[in-house]
Amino acid sequence: MPPTIRLRDGADERLKKAFALDTDTALANHIGVDQGHYSRILNGRTSPGPSFQARLLIAAEKLGIDFYDLFEVVPDPDLQDT
């Protein structure tokens, strides 16, 4: 499995609190992404692509939240030292 990027656990709750939003749908609308796509990212069924990452980072930078606060890099286990 190649390395990938995923939304950190708890990032959605942190963002909802920071933006004073109550639902995932409201957060998806706030950052300008489709709620269904956002749900698939939250559930790990799809990786956050460049457009999603950019939209989220633009919204979050006003709050002092950066890439590594929101996302984590998942390495390829085959490339890890044993």
Image: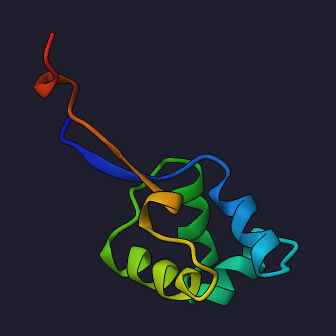
Q: Which residue is at 77% across, 81% downward? A: 19
| Residue 49, position as x, y percentages in the image | 34, 69
Residue 15 to residue 77: above or below: below
* Residue 81 lies in quadrant: top left
Q: How many numbered discs sit on the rendered protein?
A: 0
Residue 47 to residue 77: above or below: below
| Residue 3, position as x, y percentages in the image | 22, 43
Q: Which residue is at 56% across, 72% downward? A: 65
Using residue 35 as the reference point, say whether residue 26 is left or right of it. Answer: right
Using residue 39 as the reference point, say whether residue 46 is left or right of it. Answer: left
Q: Which residue is at 58% across, 78% downward? A: 64
Q: How is the image coloured?
A: rainbow
Q: Residue furthest top?
A: 82
Q: Which residue is at 57% across, 90% downward? A: 32
| Residue 18, position as x, y percentages in the image | 76, 75
Please state, as top left, top right, bottom left or bottom right, where the N terminus lies in the image: top left
Residue 35 to residue 32: above or below: above
